[in-house]
Image (cartoon, rainbow, N blue to C red):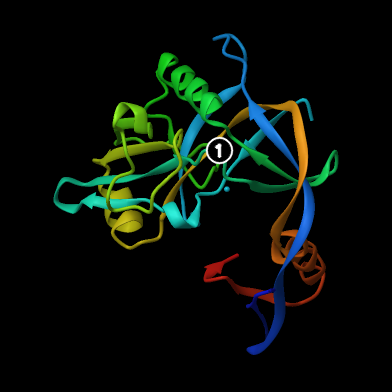
Amino acid sequence: TSTQTQVAVVQNQNEFSITKKKTMKKLMTYELDINEDENAESGIDYVSLVDDPATQESWMAFEAQKSFAFKVSSPERRIITGAAMIADMPIYRKDDARGEYNVVFRKPVIEKIVKKWAKLNKFNNVNMMHEEGTQTEGVYCIESFIIDSERGITTPKIFDKASDGSWFLSYYIENDVVWNEFIKTGIFKGFSVEGMFGFEIKAHAEVVEVDMDEQHLQTIFDILKRTPYVLGSVGGKTK
């Protein structure tokens, strides 16, 4: 069953619509991994605060998963909590080298990533919207935990149940601008990780639901940018 949503495109105050569809498609799925060597570039560089909560080795940024957007778990204490990585969740990608495909982080790999992130003391490496030069002061990691049912570490009650191996973070927002203008207003809704990841050879094809918008919307936008159109909101966001 396909679903449809709408994209608004504005031209001189006249609104047009582009129909977006989801369809079933067979895509290759690659398992991502890192090199645990401290001197290797692979691993997490930054956790980014974002507005939309997903080669041999490539730099990647993953948007926050919508169902696990962070929560203001303690407003009076300025604490936000959310998932940074969800184990076994396919993430759609597209590039010139591989075309369309999915990537996935497995539980053991997420553990390796978190251990290296901690070992290199990157707890407070936080930026905004993955933009260079926006490392944010006054945002401090106060909790980092991996969901592990055997150890009794479960998903916080304010979230849907996450699979074992998923990584959650909590930050204390001391920065008044970030708290008042971006968190309290709801502009930032989730965490997103960025860094270098290697593609594991273990790849397989599976049938998955693909949002056609993810495949074609950028092409549509590129065409529209060559015309006098002004882009409006896309799925509730301003592009």
Name the residue nearer the viewer: 144 or 193: 144
**Would you name the residue on which mark 1 appears?**
132
- Position of 100 relative to 108 (above/below): below
* Residue 3 screen position, x and y as percent: 65, 75
User: Which of these two is toward me, 46 or 94?
Assistant: 94
Residue 227 placement, left or right of 48 = right
In this view, the residue in front, 25 or 13, is 25
* Residue at the extreme left: 76
Q: Residue 154 location in percent, x, y?
A: 32, 39
Q: Amino acid at mark 1?
A: Glu
- Furthest residue toward front: 150
**208 or 123: nearer the eye?**
208
Q: Residue at x 62, y 15 (%)?
A: 35
Q: Residue at x 58, y 34 (%)?
A: 105
SS for dot 1: loop
Which residue is rendered at x = 57% and y = 45% of the image? 89
Q: Which quarter of the image is occupied by the N terminus?
A: bottom right
